[in-house]
Every structure is written in structure tokens, then in C-alpha cells.
């Protein structure tokens, strides 16, 4: 984001990548423990229009989100027995993107990182040199894992609990940021425009229905694990500062910080149980 102005075309889209995408992941579980993971990624209308105007022959970032090779690499990271069932380009309401359907034989073998496949597709799209020389690599997030036996699914989220670091800034814990630090109105307006279409959603769908569950958010046969509408979050400058300060906060930290945002859903339990009908 720091060097957006000097770049044009595909590079500009790459710089806007995290902020102009809507990513929806649906994990579908069958009663025998098999199922699919469908990941849909859509660029915002503005980014889609920008890519439509790119010169012919240039590298178009949208293709990376339905690239069979990248999908296969992501499948290999999801665990033994996970394969790519289908990849396809998407066009919806003036937006473009891609859909990848992964297939698994046994959910017990699945290791899933929310947004992981999206990150894999986009990691080589940004311009070089953004990270300072010698900067330490960020520790990899631990994946969600699953245990399924006798019709009962347990989803383990190792990063759900609060970090519990007393040295964290108040904004990272969900408290209001320092009032003396004022956000430049022009920068705020630019950020709000960039992030207005960003949304990350992760859902579990049980094909045969849910008999019972301790999940926080359930609707019919669907459990929502994450639904983060970033546009709503940063519509308030106070929330924008919270978001900037949080960085590596846990889902529980984020849920506490943005608890008043309409439509936001974050599962904060470190283990969720779902009993299949």
C-alpha cells in the first residue's frame, strides 16, 4: 500500500490486492467424512474495470485465482487426499475472479487456513522490495484441523483465543485508540474506498443437516466461522485505527474490538462441535 502511486496496470492491482477482494470459502461435509472446499475470489468492480482496460498480452492478475497449477499447490498444503476437482473463471455483477473446488476423502486429514489459497495465488503479484532488508519473516498461522467420528465433527482453531499479551497497545485489545492521533481525512477517504468491497467469509455446510452444535453462528445446515465485512469496519475512523493496530490479533481479539459492527461474525471458540443428522 505504501507505494501505490508509482505503479500502474497489473502492478497497481497487485498493490490493491488485499483490499479489493471478496473471498468466500465453503467447506461442505458429507456424512461419510468426505466433502469439498469451494473458494471463490472476486475483485471489486473498480479493479475489474481496471483489468479490463489493461493492454492485450499483459499479465492479468485475475487468472491466478483459477490457475490449475496454483490450485494444485494449495491442495497439497491442505492435507493428504485433498485434490483439485475444478477451477473456473468467474464473472458476477461486473466483477471478475475465480473459483476453485477442492475435494477431500477424509476431513480428518484436512488442514485449512482461512484465505490461505487466496494468499498463495496472490503472493507473487506484489512488486518486489516492499519488505525491508533483513526483516524477520512473519510466523505462519497455524491451520484449522478437524476430527470426525461417529457423525460428530470437531473443528479446532488454534488461534481463536486471545493472545493474552499485556504489552499490546490498547487499540489491539479493542479499546479506543489515542484521541491525539488524528487520521488525515484524505487518507481515510482513500482507505475507505479501497477496502469497501473487501470481505472474507468462511462457512461449514453439512450436506445431511445439523442435529446440534455449540457453534456461535448457525443458520439451517450452515455454520459461519468468519464473516468480516471490512467496508463496514473502516467506515468509522475509530475502527480504522483499531484495525491498523491489531496486526496479529486473534479472532477473539478482533471479535471484541469490533463487536458492534453489523453483520460481523467471528467464531471465538477454540473448538466447535457439530453433530450431523
Image (spheres, rainbow, N blue to C red):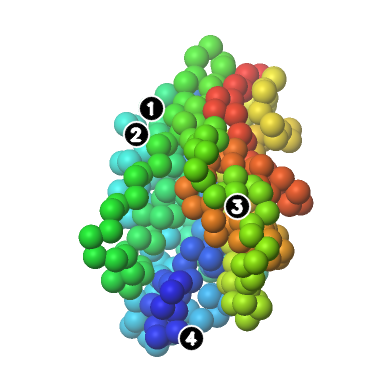
The residue carrying mark 3 is: 171
Name the image quarter holding the C terminus: top right
**C-alpha distance separating marks 2 and 1:** 5 Å
Looking at the image, tell me whether mark 1 or mark 4 is earlier in sequence order: 4
The residue labelled by disc 2 is 79
Of pointers 1 and 3, the one earlier in the residue sequence: 1
Residue on which the image places disc 1: 109
Disc 2 + disc 1, Cβ < 8 Å? yes
Q: Earlier in the sequence, mark 2 or mark 1?
A: 2
Q: Residue at x 53, y 12 (%)?
A: 150
**Disc 4 secondary structure class:** loop
Is the residue marked by circle 4 packed among few (<14), some (14-19), or many (20+) residues within 10 Å? few
The alpha-carbon separation of the residues under discs 1 and 4 comes to 43 Å
| Residue 34 image offset from top left, x and y in percent | 47, 28
Residue at figure coordinates x 42%, y 24% from the top left: 108
The residue labelled by disc 4 is 53
- Which structural element holds mark 3? helix
Q: Residues within 10 Å of mark 3 (few under 14, many from 20)?
A: some
Amino acid at each position: 500500500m505504501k507505494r501505490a502511486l508509482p505503479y500502474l496496470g497489473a502492478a497497481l492491482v497487485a498493490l490493491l490486492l488485499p483490499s479489493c477482494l471478496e473471498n468466500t470459502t465453503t467447506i461442505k461435509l458429507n456424512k461419510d467424512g468426505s466433502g469439498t472446499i469451494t473458494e471463490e475470489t472476486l475483485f471489486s468492480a473498480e479493479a475489474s474495470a481496471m483489468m479490463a482496460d489493461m493492454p492485450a498480452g499483459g499479465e492479468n492478475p485475475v487468472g491466478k485465482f483459477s490457475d490449475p497449477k496454483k490450485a494444485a499447490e494449495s491442495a497439497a498444503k491442505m492435507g493428504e487426499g485433498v485434490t483439485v476437482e475444478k477451477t473456473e473463471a468467474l464473472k458476477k455483477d461486473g466483477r471478475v475472479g475465480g473459483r476453485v473446488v477442492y475435494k477431500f476423502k477424509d476431513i480428518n486429514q484436512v488442514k485449512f487456513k482461512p484465505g490461505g489459497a487466496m494468499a498463495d495465488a496472490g503472493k507473487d503479484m506484489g512488486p518486489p522490495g516492499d519488505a525491508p532488508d533483513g526483516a524477520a519473516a512473519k510466523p505462519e498461522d497455524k491451520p484449522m484441523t478437524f476430527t470426525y467420528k461417529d457423525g460428530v465433527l470437531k473443528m479446532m482453531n488454534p488461534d481463536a483465543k486471545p493472545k493474552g499479551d499485556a504489552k499490546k497497545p490498547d487499540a489491539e485489545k479493542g479499546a479506543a485508540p489515542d484521541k491525539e492521533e488524528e487520521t488525515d481525512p484524505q487518507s481515510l477517504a482513500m482507505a475507505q474506498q479501497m477496502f469497501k468491497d473487501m470481505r472474507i467469509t468462511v462457512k461449514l455446510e453439512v450436506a445431511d443437516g445439523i442435529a446440534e452444535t455449540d457453534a456461535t453462528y448457525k443458520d439451517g445446515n450452515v455454520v459461519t466461522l468468519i464473516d468480516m465485512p471490512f467496508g463496514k469496519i473502516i467506515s468509522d475512523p475509530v475502527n480504522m485505527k483499531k484495525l491498523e493496530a491489531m496486526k496479529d490479533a486473534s479472532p477473539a481479539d478482533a471479535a471484541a474490538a469490533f463487536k458492534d459492527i453489523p453483520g460481523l461474525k467471528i467464531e471465538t471458540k477454540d473448538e466447535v462441535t457439530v453433530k450431523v443428522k
